[in-house]
Amino acid sequence: MVNFQLKHNLLITIFIIAIIFAMWLLMKALSYSFSELQKNTDPVLTQNEEVSKEVSYMEKIDNFALQEFGMDNQLSRFVKAKNYFHFKNSPALLLEPEVTTYDVKGNKDYVLTAERADYLDSGEIKFKGKVNIRSGSGITHKMKTRELLVSTKTDDLISNKKVTYLGENLKIVSQGMHMQTKEDKMKLTGKAVIKQDSGQKIVTKNIYIDQSNGQKHYYSKYDTTYLAQEDTIYSKGMDLDMQKEIMQLLGKVKILQNSGTKIDTQDLTVDQSNDGDVYRTKEKIHYQSKLADIRAIGMHYDTKKRKIKLTGGVIGSYE
């Protein structure tokens, strides 16, 4: 009797263990299936910072393309994207969009590409991430921004968010951007910092960019601070020609050296073409160091060699 009871309890225990094992296998299988389902789900929703993961798109179109026509029934804009996603309560999402605008003669105004964009109900397109702008004349602008709006009325490109403009041998960070595409003129708005590959910094405001006729021309009419390795220079504006590697610091100029020396002048030329700054001016100079107080008309200062030449009726006192 005891053996029979023992066998009965053993069978029940084995049966329970078998059920638990079967349930474990089922849970593992379901977990694997769910994991695979997540892998196979389109990753677009996780990339869209504006839409919650729990919200599903209502419509998806691959190889999206759309032609837009003006009042005269002439093609004004062509929009295409790798993927188009339509959401219920959020703007449509374009992945790898390309927008081409056309002038009244049917010629390309510019082509704009980016990582992604929101396509608004108003017809305006808000680009995000890395943005490339190529004008009809062949000029290319590269930048990164959280938001770049294409206006439907003027085709101007506008951003009120931080913009990082990627130029040749420099990078500019500004608080916004406005580009008049029909005139191929760009303005980086608000406080702007130019970081040159050679290590110098230029801090100013409202920088205009002109690349017409092969130029690489950056200029501002606002107070400017130039930060070099040994010097800090203050001026009333700047004009930087990266083609010639020449910068003009405009108006009243003050040079403060790490040694404590001060140089007051105006309209200073900074020549960056020979692997080092050379300061030149033909204007009045007031040079003040711990040992000397000198006035002159004209200066040539090689910062790499740390040699300064003052010219034109030099008058000074020494301690």
Image: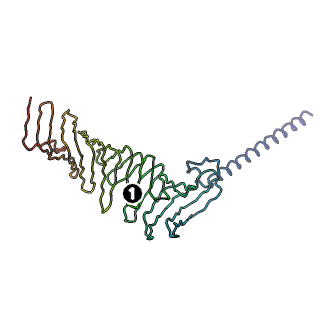
Quarter residue 258 falls in: top left
Q: Left of 49 or right of it: where is 27?
A: right
The image quarter in which residue 211 lies: bottom left
**Disc 1 on helix, strand or loop?**
strand
Where residue 44 sits, quadrant-wise, is bottom right
How far across and how far down the image is residue 212, in percent? Answer: 32, 61
- Give left or right: position of 21 versus 132: right
Residue ID at (31%, 48%): 220
Q: Residue at x 40, y 57 (%)?
A: 180
Of 120 and 221, the residue lying toward us: 221
Instruction: Please identify the quadrant where the N terminus is shown.
Output: top right
Identified at 37% across, 64% down, the residue is 138
- Where in the figure is residue 289, as x and y percent of width and height? 15, 33
Please give the name of the residue rendered at 7% of the width and 37% of the height, measured from the top-left corner.
315
Q: Nearer the viewer, residue 149 or 44?
A: 149
Give 128 or 75, whichever is nearer the viewer.
Answer: 75
The residue labelled by disc 1 is 141
Question: What amino acid is at disc 1?
Answer: His
Residue 259 placement (x, y as % from top left) = 20, 33
